[in-house]
Amino acid sequence: MTTNFSLAGRRALVTGAARGIGAGISKALADAGAAVMIGDVLADLGRDTALTLSAGGATVRFTPLDVTSDEAWAAAVAATIAELGGFDILINNAGIEITSLVTEVNADDLRRMCDVNIVGTMLGMKHALRAMRPGGAAGKGGSVLNISSVAATIAFPAIAGYSATKSAVDRATRIAAVESGKLGYGVRVNCLYPGLVPTDMGMKLAADIVAAGLSPSIEAAVGDVIGQTPLGRLGEVSDMADAAVFICSDAARFITGIGLPVDGGMGT
Ligand SMILES: NC(=O)c1ccc[n+]([C@@H]2O[C@H](COP(=O)([O-])OP(=O)(O)OC[C@H]3O[C@@H](n4cnc5c(N)ncnc54)[C@H](O)[C@@H]3O)[C@@H](O)[C@H]2O)c1
């Protein structure tokens, strides 16, 4: 029985990993010994990230993947199995956030967030469970980690649509975990609730909060979030990445169907 956080010999697909939290999780998985396939719509940046992360000798590849497409998922999973020799870990990280007050919501923006955040995550779970379950193309069980958000657990202004999609991810995670367990797939399914992390997405949200009239400046908006966070700082990509390694490792072998807050206590 393994009781550390090693991922030696595991093969992982990480979506939305050209940059931000996904790139950080890819690095941490590779550091823990996994071979990693980066899937993203940003092909040039995704290839660059894969090249950078593989410089130290790790196996990190890139495959084009638009998570809203069933066909693209089939191709990305096939590429992962073909190039990495199997498929044991899926990190459903790709996501978008389009800020809006409820009074200003735009139907197309809402549909786009539903498409990437909900449909994309659901298709990922579909293809991962099919591939990882007994008799599947990889067939050795595994771990699926969906990236939800602290926004699924609190009422943060100007992100009602986004928060709704992340609550949907949370609920779907739990149902997939129950199905996988009851049907003997050998795949654990969990989700993570990151707090605010100053990636491209996180800093745009801070600017949008100012534009929506909810805060006088980006500094004040960030300060409000820190004030709501018992540990007194923003999240870092490495905070999310280390939690992802733990959840995907054998140390978490009896953990499925949970939402793990990695938010410094913001959602408590
Ligand atoms: N940054 C935060 O504060 C924060 C907080 C909580 C949750 N999250 C979640 O963490 C995840 C990563 O966020 P981030 O901050 O790194 O964002 P980011 O915008 O920096 O990166 C998102 C990545 O997803 C990719 N992507 C977008 N649409 C895609 C699609 N259709 N198919 C494949 N890839 C696609 C982008 O190209 C990009 O590489 C998201 O699901 C986000 O909702 C972020």
Image (spheres, grey):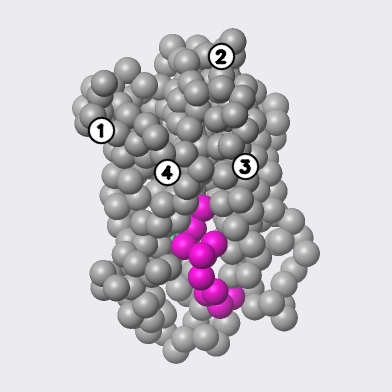
For disc 2, the neighbor class at 10 Å (few under 14, some 14 to 19, many from 20) is some
For disc 3, the neighbor class at 10 Å (few under 14, some 14 to 19, many from 20) is few
Horizontal placement of 36 versus 123: left or right? left
Point out the tag, 4 or 2, that comes first from the N-terminus: 4
Q: Which residue carries the number 2 mark?
A: 134
1 or 4: mark nearer the eye: 1
What are the residue bounds of the magenta stretch? Answer: 148-158
Q: Are marks 3 and 2 in contact (CB under 8 Å)?
A: no
For disc 1, the neighbor class at 10 Å (few under 14, some 14 to 19, many from 20) is some
Q: Which quadrant is home to the N terminus?
A: top left
Q: Which residue carries the number 3 mark?
A: 175
Residue lying at 36% horizontally and 56% vertically, measured from the top left: 262
| Residue 133 x %, y % | 56, 19
Residue lying at 51% horizontally and 43% vertically, measured from the top left: 257
Horizontal placement of 73 versus 17: left or right? right
Residue lying at 51% horizontally and 37% vertically, measured from the top left: 189
Residue 22's tag is 4
Q: Give the tally of numbered discs.
A: 4
| Residue 233 x %, y % | 27, 69
Point out the tag, 3 or 4, that comes first from the N-terminus: 4
Q: Which residue carries the number 1 mark?
A: 5
Check disc 1 and give the amino acid type. Phe
Q: Are marks 4 and 2 in contact (CB under 8 Å)?
A: no
Image: 11 above or below 18: above
